[in-house]
Image: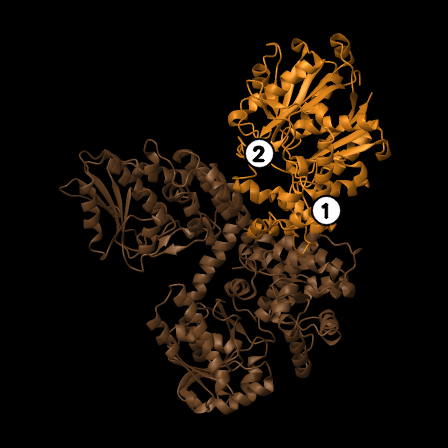
Chain colours: A brown, B orange
Amino acid sequence: MSVFKYERDNDGIVTVTMDMTGPVNAMNAEYHEAMSETIAKLEAEQGMTGVVFASAKKVFFAGGDLNDLVKADPEQAEAFFNATEEMKAGLRRIEKLPVPVVAAINGAALGGGYELCLACNHRIAYDHKSVQIGLPECSLGLYPGGGGVVRLTKLIGVEKALPYILESKCLVPAKALKVGMIDQLVDSIEALVPAAKEYILSVKDDELAAVQVWDRKGYRILGGAINTPRNVQTATMGPAMLSQKTRGLMPQMTAAMDVAFQASMLDIDTALRIEGREFAKIATGPVAKNMISTFFFQLNKINGGASRPQNVEKNLTRKVGILGAGMMGQGIAYVSAMAGIEVVLKDISQDAADKGKAYSEKLLQKRIARGQMDEAKAKGILDLILPTDKNEDLQGCDLIIEAVFENIGLKHGITKEIEPYLSEDGFWGSNTSTLPITQLAEASAKPENFIGIHFFSPVDKMPLVEIICGEQTSDEALAKAFDYTMQIRKTPIVVNDSLGFFTSRTFGTYLDEAAHLLTEGTNPVRIDSLGKAIGMPVGPLQIQDETSLELSRKAQETWAEMGVTDKWGNGDVIRRVIKDMITDNGRGGRYHGGGYYEYHEDGSKNIWPPLYELYYNADYQISDQDIKDRLMFRQVIETLKCLETGVLRSVADANIGSIFGIGAPAHTGGFIQFVNTYGFDAFIARCDELAAKYGERFNCPEIVKEQAKSGELFS
Amino acid sequence: MSNTAYIYDAVRTPRSKGKKDGTLHEVKPIDLGAGLFRALQQRNDLDTSYVDDVIMGCVSPVGEQGSDIAKMIVQNADWDESVAGVQLNRFCASGLEAVNSAAAKVASGWDNLIVAGGIECMSRVPMGSDGGAMVGDAAFAVKTGFVPQGIGADTIATIDGYSREDVDAYALESQKRAAKARDNGWFDSAVVPVLDKNGVMILERDDFIKADSTMQGLGGLRASFAEMGKYGFDDIILKKYNTLERINHVHTPGNSSGIVDGASAVLIGSEQAGKDLNMTPRARVRATAILSSDPIIMLAGPGPSAKKALKTAGMTKDDIDLWEINEAFASVAMRYMRDLDIGHDITNVVGGSIAMGHPLGATGGCIIGSMLNELERRDLSTGMLSLCVGGGMGISCIIERV
């Protein structure tokens, strides 16, 4: 009995119901066998009038098996190409059947799942938000190489297809219908197969219904081929915009655009073959490996609760108190209310608290204006937020997040004052980016319920939360903080208590290395330009201006008070820069009237001219590669140290945390995956070179040497 | 080298706006070329059967300009059926490349007489009609970091520090010089009027020159490439030139070369050809040079190519009396003068493409004629001609009166 159930009805319609072993239908060895058999049977049918592809699973079809994909090496490119060609030949045979073939899409059809739909003549979907349709491959370092680029391009035209291919957008059925990615909607799962059969019967006399548009005589692609004059804009600007967005670091997107452009000019079979050749190169290349490992396997692991204590029952936060309605507090209030959590937003004055709530109102108004939300729903969310200056309003909160200034004394005081209002089994979260949780918890009556919840700014946009366990933090508190983070739809990484935790400490090395480069005499523009060239979202000087030099100065001050100055390395250079910039020149950063840059009213900015006089030395010789590697390696080395010393508890947290929290280049798969792909021996050798040339801060951590001996990658 | 390549004559059509309201829009490319060829034949009482080959530059060799337009023009001009023809494309250098190639063929001794020049009816076959990998090949564009030439020109201005006023002032001077030269009839002996089939005049002289240009008028024009730059091209430049903070977009239609229709033809032959046909040589080709520089900026090749030509000729810059640099963009000419440390007083003395327009494939031939005329008028000896070329190439040619 095949896992593809095969039934022919009295009208001559064959329904193939995919019901593979395991939770989903996927493109694996079992698929190949079942599909080959099915196709052979379909081709042998006499008097058949149509075919319906349906699914017995919740998901229509889940696409390629990433376990296989992530293992494919460049040496296997030829075999990989041949295997893909064989799979694609099957899809080609389906679309060449002499009868209409209909996809009855009952659940998600993403990636390979949607590629199967594209090989059908007609696509009907159950109109429900769980039915996600799209081609998300590019977000995993791949591209739709199972005919997806070629067929979508040929179906809706190159200009319309490209955003859905490159941006990995997943659509609900109504939107997919509008775009032309599917043809018909039904409003229940039960109606799917009948609707498919009805369609087949309705086109019984239409011979063209069995022929894909691109196989019809006189087919012309919508919007024209890329080399026609009216597409000159797309042809010229498309690659430029892609270069701007990816800085040339996402080969899968370049290849996808290239294949789409060619598909617009060539016949389907040639285009499919080109798609396959490029795909073999991309799928066996490093970026695919990096992105699949991190954004699929490791992210799933994290979201699946790998770092959450398993012995604690799932906890739902119903009422959260937020202390401090500043930039962080108001953001935390917004994301909590968006998740349906009741929020008490407390500040010293009612006015400050109201201002904090107004932030949510502004964001909700934007959503309404964009048509993402209706007025009533927005009002409901806003009503969840109670702005107040009274401690009593916090009574009964099952979570209180303190988001006041980074000052131990202040935080201690507030903990003592407000902790009593917490509900009996409530827990306390401190939003701090550097202060040790164990020390902060000293003021708490129940240090086991005390945990660090480090949000990133702007809270509504940044996807990460860094949870920090103090020495006494209990499994219960960790589980609750984890559940709350998932509740507000963010990704939690869990780290152990240590000055600067993981993200702030590592991020600091990016800024510190920029200070080294600057004081050595490197052109400041070049430092920021090369920071972006390695794939960081912004250059180090610019980002330090945004987060403010003043903040760095205060942090140094706090560490001095705590007696932990230079705990993770010599900070003389950055202290010198801070002194030169702030003490001597009053340049505290963007929101302090300017920093490394000066900012103009029209939104433009340029390097503050005296910065050149302070440090720039036109005779200083350093290669672009050295600058790039220094900016990258410092962060990678710091991450390795965090892993080595147990600040980080897992490689997954390191990679995801570095990308979502610090902006590590996505194509590298994060700061630890970077070492896997760079190669241990090569990495150790490059560290040695950099250390010899620029100082011991580039010494390679032992953990790499140990890992190299083990013969296994970091995972 | 065994033989000397002499220039016996150099003619061009007048240039006119390369859009549908341009005076030459109504003229077929092969008719524009044929008219010029007939005039060349008549001026020299040329026995066309003596001509070994015709080399014509054309940058958009498709449609009406397709399928080896050089041969089509030869036939359309009723030249002897023994005359061959080849079209070549080295982007904006095509016309000068045709001249340089012809000179090399003659110098080799394998050919005796060649017509070299170019044609570009930009109003009928728009720029870019021939496609190519720079536009529409995503993999190539991302890999090589292609940016449109205007962005490259703006980058030169940014690096060298030319302000908007600087480039506009240069453009104004080009207009003034071209208008003066035309109005004094200095171009007339090299410009062949375009007539219709009945011999009725269509265009007698250049009508693209804007003699009434002012700094104020030029200053009012919008920078052409600022918007395009925002959509990614500026970032591509800034990634390579990583000490630049931004691109200063200074080029406008007023200080860039104009899009025009036009054709050119230069008669290049051996000493023997002159004797056989009773023609007197006007100049000889001393040296030629081609090279490439950064393909992203794309426009920085002329200075280096001129230096290469000087080296080949065993000359120094002081041996050159007049310089001609195609004014693709004002910053290109300004960078050229800076590279070679020469003054504007001896460079582009009768204006250039900013004023007269740049009929892509024809320009190289056009400037041979103006240079020759001006050397003769001033009784000077030696001229250097250079153009910037797509893909970062630069081309030069040194001519010397005999």
Residue at left offset 25%, top offset 39%: A100
Look at 46% across and 77% down and name the residue there: A358
Say which mark, if any, is on residue B18.
2
- Can the viewer see residue B207 in this picture? yes
Residue B169's tag is: 1
Q: Residue B81 location, x and y as percent?
A: 59, 10
Nearest to N terminus: mark 1 or mark 2: 2
- Position of B181 with respect to A311 (left or right) is right
Q: Mark 1 and mark 2: span between their CA atoms? A: 24 Å
Q: Residue at x 66, y 79 (%)?
A: A559
What amino acid is at disc 2? Answer: Gly
Q: Position of residue A425 (x, y in %)?
A: 40, 85
Give the residue drawn at x 82%, y 31%: B311
**Residue A90 on image: x %, y %:** 34, 39
Task: Place residue A565 in its image quadrant.
Answer: bottom right
Q: Label 1 is placed on what type of residue? A: Ala
